[in-house]
Image (cartoon, rainbow, N blue to C red):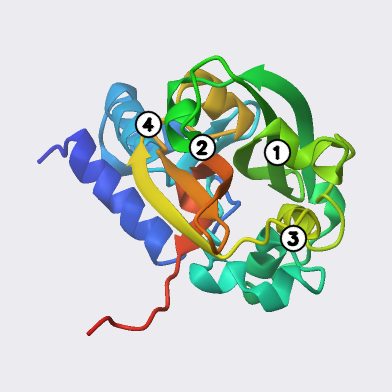
Amino acid sequence: MTIGYRELAEILRIGIQQGEYPPGSTLPKQSQTAEDHGVNIKTVRQAIRLLEAEGLVTPVRRRGTVVREHPPMKRLGTERYAKSNWKFGLVAFAADRQTSGRAWSPTDQTQTVRQISADAEIAEAYGISEGSPVYERARLVKEGDSPTHTLTSYYRPEDVEGTPLGDPTPGPAGPGGGFAVLTIQGLEPDSMTETIYARMPTPDEAETLQLPAGEPVMVLQRRTFTRDGRLVEFARGIHAASRFAWSYTFQIPD
């Protein structure tokens, strides 16, 4: 009995999961797969497209169908923002790397800094008029050559003008990153609200994060407040879904 592309995809999927095709290896050539399973090339291509949409494989020119690496980095929850980290020079993404047993370098983060007009979302967060000037600090974070996420923070000009948060030099804004800079400004972060949801990437996001077809992104919105409730940072992050395992530890409320 001839199998369909879904059945063939399941056979290949099991081979990947059981290590027959380890990460970084290539699947057999499509002509060989067709011969081995008694199907035509069209069926093989449909099966491969299905696995690609699941994020299991990536077609690579002149190599073939490559099994994707899946070493998710642990992205900490509240622990990544511990004051004991950034007050002593460890920025949040570096805390994630250390917990995941990964090396990190300041040059893993690059950024562009500019003054822009606040869009509706930024304006609502800060309680300012749409179009008001804000500082935008857009970062791209990589692990080796692979982008992991972007994070773009927005600040009131009066809070960050003349500080390292306005410096586009690659790497964090000095020891402890932006939170340490805000603290020196008398704006010590004390609480934050994070909102997270998933969606498919825009074409620009897929290109920036080098995402294979079918991989979603995790979108983060972060609001950071001082102890007296003043918003000192509004941030938006785009994370490659397969590159992070989100981890939260917290006290259960009464």
Q: Which residue is outermost to the left?
A: 1
Q: Position of residue 185 (x, y in %)?
A: 78, 53
Q: Is residue 184 left or right of residue 40?
A: right
Name the one closer to the observer, 99 or 183: 183
Q: Quadrant of residue 254?
A: bottom left
Mark whose residue sits in front, 2 or 4: 4
Q: CA distance from mark 4 to mark 3?
A: 36 Å
The type of residue carrying mark 4 is Met
Q: CA distance from mark 3 to mark 1?
A: 20 Å
Q: What residue did someone put label 4 on? A: 200
What label does residue 183 carry, if any? 3
Classed neighbour count for the residue bearing mark 1: other residues with Cα under 10 Å, few (<14), some (14–19), many (≥20):
many
The type of residue carrying mark 1 is Arg
What label does residue 5 carry, if any? none
Q: What residue did someone put label 1 on? A: 139
Q: Position of residue 32 (x, y in %)?
A: 43, 37
Classed neighbour count for the residue bearing mark 2: other residues with Cα under 10 Å, few (<14), some (14–19), many (≥20):
many
Residue depicted at x 56% and y 62%: 71
Secondary structure type for disc 1: strand
Q: CA distance from mark 2 to mark 4?
A: 17 Å
Classed neighbour count for the residue bearing mark 4: other residues with Cα under 10 Å, few (<14), some (14–19), many (≥20):
some
